[in-house]
Amino acid sequence: MKTSPLLATLCLALSLATASLRAADPAAAWRAADDARIAVMISADPAKLAVVFSDDLLYVHSNGKVDTKATFLPAIAEGRSVYRKVTYEQRDFREVAPGLVHMTGRCRVQLGKTAPYNELYLSVLAAYRLEKGVWRFLAWQSAKLVEPAPAAK
């Protein structure tokens, strides 16, 4: 399989960014990998999705549906799953083994092709694995949260 120049450039850029950030601040590299994943999911570019997603991706949606790279990548690229925005309220990273990072957090995700968009408030657990010098998105598990009640005045 031939690699396109754009794909090769993206891989090199991710690899260099990961290496330099990891040396200075490991958590910065992990945040950058997660930020890149979100941007790529919003862009729905199949070549970039292929680079960011691990071949072993396991993505468990908040409704219980399970996707792999083979099913999730085309769903995003073909517009069946449209990610518009992800806003974290909290996001923490922990290296659980060399080359394996868990991310926990709470976020708001905006989905859909047209307004009104589906708005989800989620608790998430994600995993990133260092593969050939690049942090790749390995796993996701999310659960819907109840919106907090407004503060009393």
Image (spheres, grey):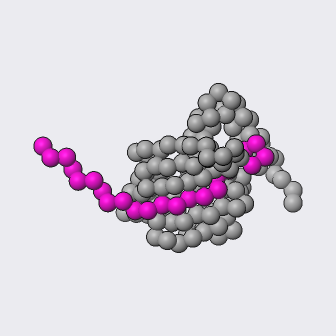
Whole-percent x, y for residue 109 in the image = 44, 55
The residue at the far left in this view is 153
Q: Is residue 37 above or below residue 141?
A: above
Horizontally, is 23 left or right of 4 in the view? left
Q: Quadrant of the N terminus?
A: bottom right
Q: Residue at x 72, y 34 (%)?
A: 19
The residue at the far top in this view is 24
Q: Which residues are magenta?
A: 131-153
The residue at the far bottom in this view is 65
Q: Residue at x 69, y 45 (%)?
A: 99
Q: Is residue 58 above or below residue 28?
A: below
Which sits in the foreground, 56 or 50?
56
Whole-percent x, y for residue 62 in the image = 46, 65
- Quarter of the figure with residue 133: top right
Whole-percent x, y for residue 102 in the image = 57, 49
Q: Is residue 108 visible?
A: yes
